[in-house]
Image (cartoon, helix red, strand yellow):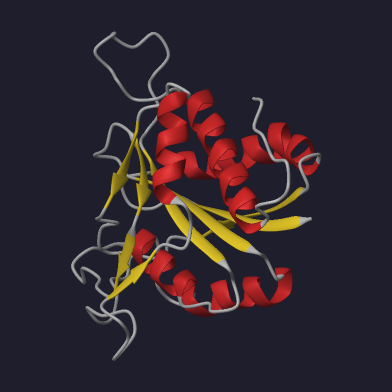
Amino acid sequence: MIKILVTGFGAFPGVPSNPSSALLFALKKKSRSRLQRFGIALELRELPVTYAGLRMRLARLANEIRPDAILQFGVAGGREVICVEKFARNHVDTRNPDASGKPAPKDVLVAHGPSVLKARIPDSEIVAALRRAGIPSALSRDTGDYVCNASFYHALRLAKVRAVGFIHIPFPRVQHAATKDKKPRFEDIVRAAEIAIVIVARALRPNAVLRYAG
């Protein structure tokens, strides 16, 4: 079994209902048993949108679950397509409070840490697969400077985890929205997550037959 820790986030200022949390519920309800047949075991966890204790929380999850991969999902309200992130940066905007109402204490996440860390997933392959499936998607070089980027950076510092990636999802298209709305529907976001999970698992076990058929 390939064990993949999939994380989403809870509510934060301006986002009382986070679609990445709804995505975790959908993966638990619809996808976990199906992916298990591909030899993929999902561990699903919602993270609070807070800076305090974030690094230790991720380290504790990694120690308890011992995943082969961590795939994180977060919402990016200003985007219209699913964005597979290439980099996390050792930087944070201290002006924006987290869900506890507190900003980050410093503008760097880790003193003397690398300024940039690169994703450890086949990001281009995931984007290509999503586009073939008709799901609007793109590679992104900017994970932002909020808790999403912080979580991605800390996860990438977990050396024992072979694959680590982050995918930003937009707010899903509202049902019966105008045709000019190019954002994916929620069911497309779930399908995109399944595709990404299978590709990550296949990269970890290249000789296995893992084909997404959703």
Q: Is residue 40 above or below residue 110?
A: above
Q: Tell me if residue 176 can be seen.
A: yes
Q: Is residue 141 left or right of residue 172?
A: left
* Farthest residue, direction front: 207
**Percent of width and height locating residue 89:** 28, 70
Q: Residue at x 45, y 43 (%)?
A: 125
Residue located at (45% from left, 32% from top): 130
**Quadrant that contains the C terminus:** top right
Q: Which quarter of the picture shows residue 107? A: bottom left
Q: Position of residue 39 (x, y in %)?
A: 78, 47
Give the image location of residue 81, x and y in percent.
32, 33
101 in relation to 126, above or below: below
> In terms of depth relative to the viewer, which is nearer, 96 or 1?
1
Which residue is depicted at the point 56% across and 37% down?
195
Which of the pair 165/182 is nearer the observer? Answer: 165
Residue situated in front as seen by the camera: 181 or 13: 181
Res 17 visible = no
Question: Which residue is found at the position 40% from the left and 39% from the top?
Answer: 127
For the N terminus, give its image quadrant: bottom right
Depth check, front residue: 178 or 193? 193
Direction from residue 19 to residue 85 in the image, left or right:
left
Q: Is residue 28 left or right of residue 185?
A: right
